[in-house]
Structure formats: structure tokens, C-alpha cells
Amino acid sequence: METNNSELDQWIATLEKKPEVKAFLNKVISEPEIIPILIEIIKINKGSVKFYCEKIIRMVSERKSSLVYPYFNDIAQLIESSNNFIKWGAIITLSNIVSEDVGSKFEDVYERYFSMFNSDSMITAGNAVRNAWKIVLIA
């Protein structure tokens, strides 16, 4: 789904108002075509809106992982984010959607994911370790 800059600006303006999380979460679950817009905002936004988007995607992955799985590669890229909050959310989201991995995409991410156990950041390592059980269960 291609989103032009004007549409992204409109979404960012809406999300800057921090819509009530539960209501917006339900909207995204009922309109999953919003997910790639949220991912794009995470990638381009310099402000705090990206954190709201990450939270919504993570919450969708906890409730309906199949809706987020089509964006597996995008989520996998986010575990390399220089922003730790985005990285930590992506670690959790990735572990939530791996149960949908019929295309064996996780094989390409396996080494990167498990190498985070040895991260210099205790929080990065902790998030990877704490969520690894979800991956181990499907292996």
C-alpha cells in the first residue's frame, strides 16, 4: 500500500493527539490496512508519534498476530533500530508473530534475534530472552 506524504502527514497529525489506545487498537484490528501506515511512520517520524505506532502494532501482534505477520520483514528490520524503544518493541512483536511464520522468514532473522542475548544493553537482552519462549514453542 502506497501512502503519499500528505496522507502520512494527516495520520501523524491525528496520532499526535494520542487517540485513546483501546479504541485505536480496535480500529486497527478492524482495518488492518492501517498497519503499513503505522510502520512507515515508525521509520520516518522524528517525534514521539513513532512510539505510539509501535505500541499499537505490538498490541495488535499480541491479539491478532496474523494481521501483523505480512509485515514480518519490516518488523525484523526494526530490531536493528538505533532507537532502543523501537528495537525493544520490535523484539516483542517479532516473537509474537513468529507463530504465523509459514514462510520460514524467521530463519533469516534467527542469528540476529538470538545474538541479542549477548547485547551490551540489559534491556535488549532481557526482552529477547523473555520472549524467546514464543519462538522455541513453534520450533
Image (cartoon, rainbow, N blue to C red):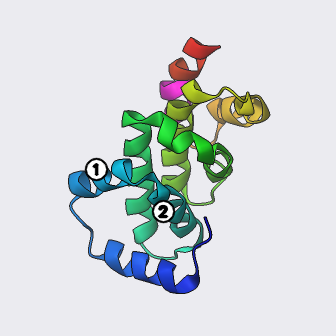
What's the residue at 56%, 60% (across, down)? Answer: 83
Residue 81 horizontal/vertical position (percent): 63, 56
What's the residue at 54%, 33% (across, down)? Answer: 97
Q: Measured along the vertical axis of the image, is residue 2 above or below residue 139?
A: below
- Number of marks in the rendered image: 2
Extent of the magenta region: 127-132
> Is any part of residue 123 visible from this angle?
no
Using the numbered discs, state the Cα–Cα distance from disc 1 to disc 2 in whole angstroms.
14 Å
Label 1 sits on what residue type? Asn
What's the residue at 41%, 75% (across, down)? Answer: 11
Q: Residue 38 shows which numbered tag? A: 2
Q: In which quarter of the image is the N terminus?
A: bottom right
Q: Measured along the vertical axis of the image, is residue 41 above or below residue 85?
A: below
For the residues labelled 1 and 2, say whether their Cβ atoms are less than 8 Å apart.
no
Does the magenta segment cover residue 130?
A: yes
Judge by depth and name the residue closer to the eye, 108 or 89: 108
Q: Measured along the vertical axis of the image, is residue 37 above or below residue 76?
A: below
Left or right of 102, for residue 85: left
Left or right of 40, for residue 118: right
Name the chief secondary structure element in magenta: helix
Determine which residue is flagged by label 1.
26
Label 2 sits on what residue type? Leu
Q: How crowded is mark 2: few (under 14 residues within 10 Å), some or many (20 or more)?
A: many
Residue 87 horizontal/vertical position (percent): 56, 50
